[in-house]
Image (cartoon, coloured by chain):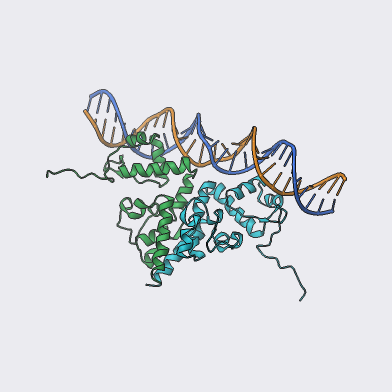
Chain colours: A green, B cyan, C blue, D orange
Amino acid sequence: MRSEIIQNQDTPLYSISTAAKMLGISVHTVRMYERAGLILPFQKESSHRLYSQSDIERLKCIRRAINEDKISIAGIQRIQALIPCWEIVNCSQQDREHCDAFNNHAYACWMYNHKKNICENLDCKSCQVYKEFYDCAKIKNRIIGITEKYESTL
Amino acid sequence: MRSEIIQNQDTPLYSISTAAKMLGISVHTVRMYERAGLILPFQKESSHRLYSQSDIERLKCIRRAINEDKISIAGIQRIQALIPCWEIVNCSQQDREHCDAFNNHAYACWMYNHKKNICENLDCKSCQVYKEFYDCAKIKNRIIGITEKYESTL
DNA sequence: AATATTTGGTATTTATAAGTATCAACTTTA
DNA sequence: TAAAGTTGATACTTATAAATACCAAATATT
């Protein structure tokens, strides 16, 4: 078996213009979504952005939400702010007290600074919270999961 | 102590034109919010709508979400669809299986039919799910509440 | 070294959601 | 029973979010 570069859904492959072309939108629109915290791109050392296949899928999902479901960008931000990140990363009571994400509800956790808590040394881009829960169905199912977890202890 | 008509925040008091005037919007806009499921008015036997002080506050909250926070109506619907109603009304596993609200994520529970479950004979207008959880902060705090409830059993 | 691309801005356009106007039929109330 | 208000529906207007176009400076590619 010869040595190969491992490629998967998370491998940074596409430049911003390639990504934009794949989605049929302008480069600026992609950056607009980034500014809004809907997507975190890979940054090369050089400051140029790169996107993986997962990023493309995420962007497609964002487009559907905006164009088909008529949810505004601000609305998507609020929805993502409801992801129960504290439960997913299982942070402590003390972590929560100092966490801006836990104590606010306007943006997803990856939009806040995480100093002095469990997330401090973690990369949001590779965190389950960011990677897995970007749409309504997945977020709702996760909330359901919490209640089921609770009920199973009764 | 003489007999008085009990008035509270939930007493139906205002006609639709009075409510619209109080909010500085048109009658039609109020009905638009109703169509979207953001507000459930009282209906007199006569089919004319009436609004309580709580309804006015709720409408003010909706207005802030739309005008200040820039969340679209479709966005508000999706956010309200994340209210963990099943946990609040504590419905059974069987109730959940047959519940359109539980099994979807596009609208709040009070927008669906509740046949053959615990909600069947309840009035959504006076249900805690509808009355208490119409904004992001309250919804998020409720989700937090579930996790804390779970953690307290450990 | 020359060409192509990306960056982060601002200014502008466009698409459309949110809101208004108007309507005839119906209901309430005075 | 006349006047005022409500209903639901359609057509129209407006406000603005989303997207595009453009820019000069920086970076990457050949």
Residue at horizontal 68 percent and vertical 49 percent from the top: B20
Taking depth in this image into account, of B81 and D9 the one nearest to the observer is D9
Q: Count the marks: how many?
A: 0
Residue at the extreme left: A1
In this view, the residue in front, B87 or B10, is B87
The x and y percentages for residue B141 are 48, 62
Q: Position of residue D21 (x, y in %)?
A: 43, 28
Measured from the top left, where is residue A11 in percent x and y? 26, 44
Would residue B141 be visible to someone looking at this image?
no
* Relative horizontal placement of residue B54, taking residue D16 as reference (left or right): right
> Splitting the image into 4 quarters, where does residue D23 fall?
top left
Residue at image location 42% in from the left, 45% down from the top: A36
Residue depicted at 63% across the width and 57% down the height: B55
Query: Vertical placement of B124 versus D14: above or below?
Result: below
- Please state if A70 lies on the left or on the right of D9 as rendered: left
Q: In the visual, does D29 lie left or right of A79? A: left
Extreme front residue here? B116
Up-down relation of residue A5 to residue B49 (above or below): above
* Residue A21 in the image, given as x and y percentages of width and height: 35, 33
Residue A113 seen in the figure = yes
State which quarter of the image contains the C terminus of chain A. bottom left
Quarter placement of the N terminus of chain A? top left
* Residue visible at 57% across and 48% down in the picture: B36
